[in-house]
Amino acid sequence: MIPTETLKHEHDVILLVLEAVEREARAIRHAGKANAERVGKMIDFIRNFADKCHHAKEEKLLFVRLEQRGIPRDGGPIGVMLAEHEKGRAHARAVAEALPKAAQGERQAAQAVADNLMGYVLLLRAHIDKEDNVLYPMGNRVLTEEDQRSLAEAFEKVEAEDLGEGVHEKYHQLARELAEL
């Protein structure tokens, strides 16, 4: 599988979780309180699968190679994607910071959790659309066959060495679990 197809598959898993995150944000707004365990699992998924696995492959591998092949970072699509990754991280941090008080029913904290969860959902859905429909096709036009091979190998190495054996599958299972909530 070419690297951008691997990333698109990961996007499908992330989108599945985003549906659950959106439902959870609505439930928090309605109840005025957050379920710390459920939101904690969502933040775990966001930080470890979406960011540490998926975004790491993009930032450390794909984007670097695309820059080498002439796609600009500054003033170009890579810079936009990197800025959006940072915005996503800020939303996740804000949720994690407000969650303890939101779980105790503090309305302002619950609102902050709900707002940041929904902000993350809206950001990531638009972000994924841009990557799938603009950046990845652009990248596939400039990447050589050797680039594709070496990136695919490097992606596997990220999963095996940076995440650890079975961790990718663990987060796929967590995504299915969250989708069913």
Image (tube, rainbow, N blue to C red):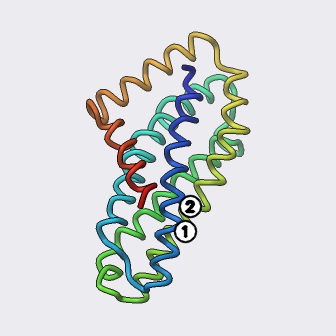
Q: Dots 2 and 1: beta carbons under 8 Å?
A: yes
* Residue lying at 71% horizontally and 30% vertically, measured from the top left: 137
Q: Where is residue 157 in the image (x, y as percent from the top left)?
A: 36, 24
* Residue lying at 42% horizontally and 81% vertically, measured from the top left: 110
Q: Residue reaching furthest front?
A: 180
* Residue lying at 35% horizontally and 36% vertically, measured from the top left: 169
Amino acid, disc 2: Val
Amino acid, disc 1: Met
Horizontal placement of 98 versus 62: left or right?
Answer: left
Q: Quarter of the image holding residue 148?
A: top right
Residue of label 1: 118
Q: Position of residue 70 (x, y in %)?
A: 69, 26
Name the disc covering residue 121, or none: 2
Q: Is residue 12 above or below residue 145?
A: below
Q: Quarter of the image holding residue 141?
A: top right
Mark 1: give few (<14), some (14-19) or many (20+) Cα within 10 Å: many
